[in-house]
Image (cartoon, rainbow, N blue to C red):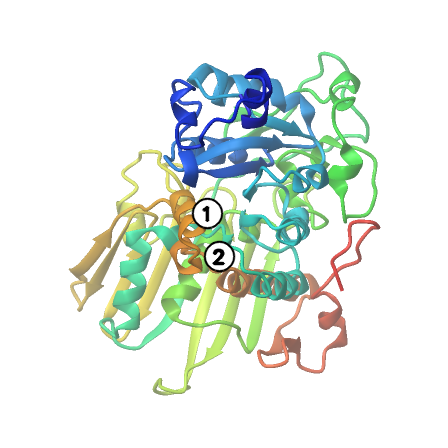
Amino acid sequence: MQRRDFIKKTGGTTVALGTFPTILTGNSWKGANDRVNVAQIGIHGFGQHHIDQYQSLEHAEVAAICDVDANLFKGTIQRHFTDKGFRKPKTYQDLRKLFEDRDIDAVSITIPNHWHTLAAIWAIQSGKHVSVEKPCCHTFHEGQKLVEVAGGSNLIVQDGAEQRSNPCGQTMADYLHAGKMGEVYLAKGICYKRRDSIGRYPDGPMKEGEKFAFTVNSKNYGPAYTKAYLSNVDYDLWQGPAPSQPFNRNRFHYNWHWNWLYGNGDMGNQGVHEMDIARWGLGVTLPTRITASGAHVMFDDMQTTPNVLMAMYEFPNPEGAGDKKRMLQFEVRHWDHNPEGAIAAETDGTNSYMTSSANTVGNLFFGSKGYMAKRLERWQVFSGPGREPVAGGSGIGNHFSDFVEAIRAGDQKLAHGDIREGFYTCALIHLGNISYRLGRSLDFDPGSMKFVNDAEADAMLTKTYREPYTLPV
């Protein structure tokens, strides 16, 4: 029961806020005076996980959910709220209406990449704290604008790089930055995930009884997007700043990742986690040279992003020996693959978040005193000709709790996901994709944040926006 409704039902009787929680029962009230009311924007896929995580926290409540696909509301409310004894959230189909709700303190954004920055900026402008999923921006310029707007507010703005909250990641960075592995000259991000073909489909809704002909991770994917289903979808709003196109099931839930208009390929999907770890451990921000090569192989389908990609970045290292540079290598593979380093030995054939029997996801670092293998929850350093283990670390944190506690304390550092760091990581993804799409190496000036004498590449740092879904000037 909303507080104002409770007051109405008690004839306007004033109830002290400190005693109000005793009126309600079960899990319907969890935080009293210092509860953070969170709105979940995007409830398909990983948005469901976000709801569960926030609802599990003592000082947070998911007070509203928002999605252009209204078909998702009923099942989501039953699964994550009423069946668990939580009170029903408000529902919004248009995020702009949600931003007008003054009962909402913070928003969690898990919508397609092409919406991330715009939704985050609008939320900040409406006075909401923001946690925005990775990648925080769809283009390089969007990241610059988001950093600018966030920096001009007194709000908590958290990037979705969850591993920043993990003791595993923190001790990894401390070990490397303390020089315990000597001169760390190369970091490698590994993103090998088995991805099936998305197929080809005509524009328009599916026919009644029609099924998807492809699978994702060996499971049949998604509902049948019939005309009746789409009558509850605001597809124009889903497209937002992207060019208006007819509905196609491959330009909707999840498969948008593989279309440049909405996504950034797997380097900007799963890979953004490993890119952040690689950049963090290497201790770099923006590169001076980028070379990327790749292809969309095996499948003749609607995917426009590569499913095999190798990107190399060079950074200056004045304190290093030899050529005075650091290097970051990133590799995406989509099908059968060989595991890499100790990361492979640790998968042991079991499935867990980000590493499984079907996938190899993680990082390698190479230094003058050994090499480090890192996956989500642990890292190990090996040294010498016998590759003996010499150091290690582990531990999983809670990025959701860090966001809520940062809001309660008014301390951005507690969020463990500064939006500027998120931008630097996303910048590498965008620069690598630009190099791939142009088919050539690129020189970049970190000071001006422009390519060196390359107007064609500079034009790809941003995109054209469809009215009224435009960034603020």
How many discs mark residues in the rendered view?
2
The type of residue carrying mark 2 is Glu
Task: Look at the image and tell me whether residue 122 can be seen.
Answer: yes
* As drawn, 375 above or below 185: above
Q: Which residue is mark 2?
A: 331
Residue shown at 73%/19% (left/top)? 229
Task: Look at the image and tell me whether residue 341 can be seen.
Answer: no
Q: Which residue is mark 1?
A: 192
The type of residue carrying mark 1 is Tyr
| Rendering coords of residue 53 (x, y %) | 42, 35
Q: In this rendered view, identify the residue nearer to me: 443 or 177.
A: 177
Question: In the structure shown, which secondary structural element does the residue marked by tag 1 occupy?
Answer: strand
| Rendering coords of residue 144 (x, y %) | 63, 66
* As drawn, 336 above or below 443: above
Horizontal side of residue 187 vs 218, given as left or right? left
Q: In this rendered view, identify the residue nearer to me: 37 or 322.
A: 37
10 Å crowding of disc 2: few (<14), some (14-19), many (20+): many
Contact (Cβ within 8 Å) of mark 1 with mark 2? yes
Horizontal side of residue 110 vs 245, given as left or right? left
